[in-house]
Amino acid sequence: LWAKAVDKFPPANESTVVYVQAQQFAWNFLYPGSDGQFGHMDMNLVSATNVFGLDTMDVSAKDDVQTLNEIHVPVNKPVILYVSSRDVIHSLKIISMRVCQDAIPGLRVPCWFVPTKVGRYQINCAQLCGSGHAYMTGGFLVVDTPEDYQKWIQAKYAAAAPPASYE
């Protein structure tokens, strides 16, 4: 029964889709830009300042939104997370959402949930990942009202948008 339930993902176009990249000892989150598309990513482009390996020459990448240790989602809307790791095995655990998904280098593993209560919830690493493992409790999931989420994401889009003279 569990296998049937866990594999029935909600449609991506009706969900909040976020890429998660764990690293010693932080959580990185990437949202598609206002165009609704993630930019092209290439593992050869990963660096200290480009943890997702976004191709900055790709038009779809220019408005993508990246956050560190905090993810915002709207209440009562499915959330699909694509979980990976930059370095060692981690495990994304959001106890209040009953989510626990290993983050494996080189893999992007999907998981999903539906947040039903507005609030701020701790994100833990459930896999011993090194000497700073205890510091990976600094991540938070913020479940917003739909209106507050729109305000938050619009502010992030505005900050990520290239200047008008960029092209």
Image (tube, helix red, strand yellow):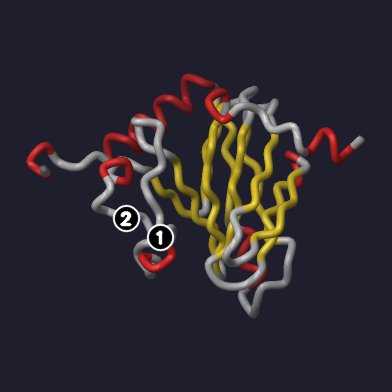
Of the numbered discs 2 and 1, the one sitting upstream in the chain is: 1
Asked where in the image residue 142 lies, by quadrant, the reply is top right
Say whether residue 16 is left or right of residue 9: left
Give the quarter of the figure containing the C terminus: top left
Give the quarter of the figure containing the N terminus: top right
Secondary structure at numbered mark 1 = loop
**Residue 29: which disc?**
none
Say whether residue 95 is left or right of residue 103: right
Q: Residue 64 versus residue 147: which sits nearer the camera?
A: 64
Q: Position of residue 58 (x, y in %)?
A: 28, 48
| Direction top: furthest residue | 147
Q: Position of residue 85 (x, y in %)?
A: 57, 63
Relative to 18, is 118 above or below?
above
- How far apart in space, not on screen, are marks 2 and 1 (Cα)? 7 Å
Asked where in the image residue 133 lies, by quadrant, the reply is bottom right
Q: Which residue is mark 2?
A: 55
Relative to 61, is 105 above or below?
below
Residue at the image position 64 percent from the left and 22 percent from the top: 76
Q: Which residue is mark 1?
A: 42
Q: Are marks 2 and 1 in contact (CB under 8 Å)?
A: yes
Q: Amino acid at mark 2?
A: Asp
Q: Position of residue 21 (x, y in %)?
A: 53, 57
Residue at the image position 72 percent from the left and 72 percent from the top: 128
